[in-house]
Amino acid sequence: MGQFWDNAAKEFGKKTGKALGNKLYGKHADDVRKRVTWVNESSSVQPSVQPTVDYGAIERAKQSTLEYEHDKQLLDTNVAIQFNTKDVDGIIKNLTFLSSSVDLWLTQSDKKKHAMAARSQFKTGLAVLNIANAEHPRLTHFTDKEQEWQAYAEKQRKRDIILYSTLAGLLVAFIIFIIIMANL
């Protein structure tokens, strides 16, 4: 019975390590494997190691780099936006651009900081528009957009609390189960 628990604990450790590695490294968690073939030469069997190239991983890395560069350029553009109270049309144009950036990044878990930076810039622009023309017809649209993002963030926060509470409960139940089984 002790052997069973040792194997179960090792397997649990392997699976947990793989899950953490996949979570931390995402697409880049793939490893390059070597293919070993056995060659029979003059009545002796020898291994022949042939490394294989994972072209899919190379392509994914290229794609990731291009996406990173695009996001960096878009973020730099967002941060560089200046609002002029005398140019209401320019403010509307920049708020629309920032709004689409936030919408793009808000749903991507690895881009939350980008979305926060764009939202901060958006709030500044919204305040400038409110000062420049408090009765502009697009002002309500942008205000509604900000409230939509706040509601989404609150929903995500509640979902995360439920998820982490559930995981903590399952972990406690698993530990109790292990302790009970070890005492038998």
Image (cartoon, rainbow, N blue to C red):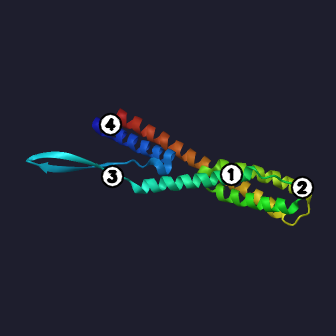
Task: Residue at 70% x, 50% y: name it.
Answer: 76
The three-letter amino acid code for the residue at tag 4 is Asp
Task: Residue at 88% x, 59% y: name it.
Answer: 87
Alpha carbons under labels 4 and 2: distance apart: 69 Å
Residue 85, numbered label: 2
Q: Position of residue 6 (x, y in %)?
A: 32, 36
Residue 75, numbered label: 1
Give the mark nearest the N terminus, 1 or 2: 1
Alpha carbons under labels 1 and 2: distance apart: 23 Å
Residue density around tag 3, few if under 14, some if 14–19, many if 20 or more, within 10 Å = few
Residue on which the image places disc 4: 6
Give the mark nearest the N terminus, 4 or 2: 4
73 or 8: nearer the eye? Answer: 73
Residue 138 shows in the view: yes
Assess whether mark 3 and mark 1 are in contact (beta carbons under 8 angstroms): no
Q: Secondary structure at mark 1?
A: helix
* Image quarter in which the N terminus is found: top left
The three-letter amino acid code for the residue at tag 1 is Leu
Residue 158 shows in the view: no
Alpha carbons under labels 1 and 4: distance apart: 50 Å
Alpha carbons under labels 3 and 2: distance apart: 60 Å
Residue density around tag 4, few if under 14, some if 14–19, many if 20 or more, within 10 Å = few
Assess whether mark 2 and mark 4 are in contact (beta carbons under 8 angstroms): no
Q: Quadrant of residue 90?
A: bottom right
* Image quarter in which the C terminus is found: top left
